[in-house]
Amino acid sequence: MARHAIFAFDQENWCSVFIDVGEASGRLEANDVDAGEYVVFDQDGTVFETWTDGPYVHLRPTDEHDPAQLRARLRRFLDEQHIECASDDVIDIAGAILEADWEDRWPKRPRWLARRLHGDAPPRL
């Protein structure tokens, strides 16, 4: 399976990681997209255009590539959120962010409910 990641940063540099464009389209909120809230990249630094069609969010890669901005935003996010990652690899960083998000999930108890809502493990890239 190919390792892939979509990174969506809001205006306060909060980073959401998605395993593909479809997941990002389904989870980004249309009103935030309309407000210009997000800057979206893939793991290679390709910048994505975002727009809405009613309640639906769409993403499309542009010709703009800015891996330096992606890495700078990721480093800032990791530092601000105190997320540890032993590697500078963008996919490893995405995995660390997903793992931290998994650890902060709610509810954790009862376990049967947590498994039903969140599955047995964090998403893997």
Image (spheres, rainbow, N blue to C red):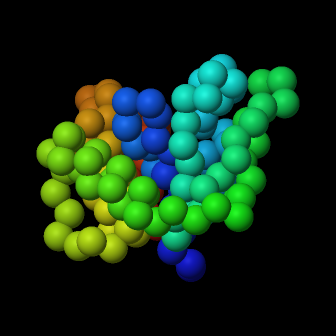
Residue sticking out furthest to the bottom: 1
Q: Image height check: is 15 above or below 3?
A: above
Front residue (pair 89, 117): 89
Horizontal side, residue 107 vs residue 1: left or right? left
Asked if one can make out residue 100 in the rendered structure from this viewpoint, the answer is: no
Residue positioned 33% across, 56% down in the render? 72
Q: Image height check: is 59 above or below 55?
A: below
Image quadrant of residue 16?
top left
Residue positioned 56% across, 79% down in the render? 1
Percent x, y of residue 60: 74, 53
Residue positioned 26% across, 36% down in the render? 104
Q: Image height check: is 94 above or below 36?
A: below
Percent x, y of residue 32: 60, 24
Front residue (pair 31, 11): 11
Asked if one can make out residue 74 in the rendered structure from this viewpoint, the answer is: yes
Image quadrant of residue 55?
top right
Residue positioned 56% across, 78% down in the render? 2
Percent x, y of residue 112: 36, 36
Horizontal side, residue 82 vs residue 68: left or right? left
Percent x, y of residue 52: 78, 31
